[in-house]
Image (cartoon, rainbow, N blue to C red):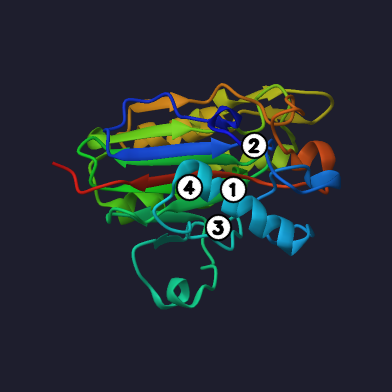
Amino acid sequence: MTTDELILPDWPAPANVRACTSTRRGGVSGGPFASLNLAAHVGDDAAAVAANRRRLRAVLDLPAEPLWLSQVHGCEAVSADRGPAAARGEPPVADAAVSRAPGRVCAVLTADCLPLLLCDRAGTTCAAVHAGWRGLHRGVIEATLARLGVPGSELLAWLGPAIGPARFEVGPEVRAAFLQQDAAAASAFRAGAGDRWLADLYALARLRLSAAGVSAVSGGDLCTLSDRERFFSYRRDGRTGRMATLIWLTRSAG
């Protein structure tokens, strides 16, 4: 595994903020999990997952093991800096992690859902968010912003690889749920076949961020389902692995 097999965010983050998204390349897993599956809950061999995580940590020279979450498509955001669950090595049940301490690595796992990274312009705090449509609807972005406690105007956001707007087909109930919360969400849906709709996760996230005052948003131009060579996709393959999106602070700001 090399750094060439990773995706580095193209965003104006401070120098002490490090971040990346893994691809499916560069690991030891086989079958539907080939090859860099980083998820321990999808049926892959545990030894292979552990080896893949060691490879990722070595290539990135991570300061610590990432705080792996037990993701449930909810809106809970936890601190990666401390906590009894993290100390025992038990994955917290949450869909976002926040850090203000150098050397603590926030991480989320995805295979079509949107991985969202946040940091402040001063380089004092960061967050990783797992934002599928259910999490977006339940307010995972808003919950993470509340835990960060930073004005939206002081935040930077990056939208990582997710299922693209031309491939994410949903039922009318999904569109209706978003429009019930915000009529402007209609712009994130395009009519598909029959009663189906094509949903734009990137646009839905941008609307939520904009409403919270976050205007500096980068990324949002990749499709996990369309790029079989680089990305796992649950919608495409069903039984499959997961990529990781990570962010951490290397030192205190200033």
SS for dot 3: loop
Q: Which of labels 2 and 4 is toward the front? A: 4
Pointer 2: what residue?
A: 175
Question: Rounded to the nearest whole Å, what is the CA distance between mark 4 and mark 3?
Answer: 11 Å
Residue furthest left as drawn: 254
Q: Is residue 127 left or right of residue 223?
A: left
Q: Position of residue 171 (x, y in %)?
A: 75, 38
Mark 2 → mark 4, Cα distance in angstroms: 22 Å
- Label 1: which secondary element: helix
Amino acid type, residue under disc 3 in the picture: Gly
User: Can you tell which mark lies on residue 250?
Assistant: none
Residue 39, quarter of the rendered image:
bottom right
- Residue occupied by mark 1: 55
Q: Compare marks 4 and 1 and give the one earlier in the sequence.
A: 1
Mark 3 or 2: the one toward you: 3
Instruction: Identify which residue is drawn at 35% across, 69% down.
Output: 82
User: Mark 2 or 4 closer to N-term?
Assistant: 4
Circles 4 and 1 in contact, beta carbons < 8 Å? no
Q: Which residue is mark 3?
A: 74
Q: Residue at x 51, y 62 (%)?
A: 94
Q: Amino acid at mark 1?
A: Arg
How many numbered circles are shown? 4
Residue type pointed to by label 4 = Val
Determine the CA span between mark 4 and mark 1.
23 Å
Amino acid on which the number 2 mark rests in the picture: Arg
